[in-house]
Image (tube, helix red, strand yellow):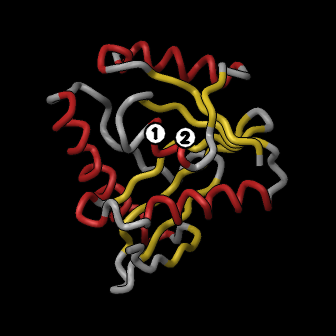
Amino acid sequence: MTARTYIRPLEPGDIERLVQIENAADTLFLEQFGPQPWPPVDAKSDVGGFILVAIAADHDIIGFAQVLEVADVAHLEQLSIAPEDGRQGHGRALLRAAIGEARRRGYERMTLRTFADIPWNGPFYSSAGFVESSPMTEFHEMLVQVERELGLHEHGRRIQMSLRL
């Protein structure tokens, strides 16, 4: 059964909770990969694009989607749900809202980069209609380089996916 989720734009007081959610969600990767020397969570509000937050019935923020607006493409930089609220439909609701907002802003395509074979990554996005694609812009090529520098490829195949809006 899908839990009820309310989605709204980021508000100034939300950032601390988003950092908490991202840190908690990263524990799923720690369980998968072990401790990693990845950079700390950033402040998120200083980048271009938009952030939507998911609110549960108890009015607590339980997740967020960050979409960068770069090179005429809406790029889903991150989708995070608090682990205790996972697998209840909140992530899918947040993804649908982010797609809708990108479409409303006039974008024709949404892209993302992810692990191909981790169930809550590639298979999840594939089930939402995203298909594997090649890097399309200099921005996407830069993301591939950053992933190499972080050593993400050592943990499984990294792919770019896209969805025509």
Spatial distance from mark 2 to mark 1, Cα to Cα?
A: 5 Å
Secondary element at image label 1: helix
Q: Position of residue 14 (x, y in %)?
A: 43, 68
51 vs 120, nearest the viewer: 120
Secondary element at image label 2: helix
Question: Which corner quadrant holds the N terminus?
Answer: bottom left
What residue do we see at 30% from left, 60% from top?
82
The numbered mark at residue 126 is 2
Mark 2: few/some/many CA within 10 Å (<14, 14-19, 20+): some
User: Relative to residue 139, is residue 19 drawn left or right?
Assistant: left
- 7 shown above or below 35: below
Q: Position of residue 125 (x, y in %)?
A: 52, 43
What residue do we see at 30% from left, 66% from top?
85
Residue type highlighted by circle 1? Pro
Q: Position of residue 139 (x, y in %)?
A: 66, 25
User: Relative to residue 103, is residue 114 drawn left or right?
Assistant: left
Instruction: Give the number of callouts.
Output: 2
Residue 95 figure quarter: bottom right
The numbered mark at residue 123 is 1
Mark 1: few/some/many CA within 10 Å (<14, 14-19, 20+): some
The numbered mark at residue 164 is none
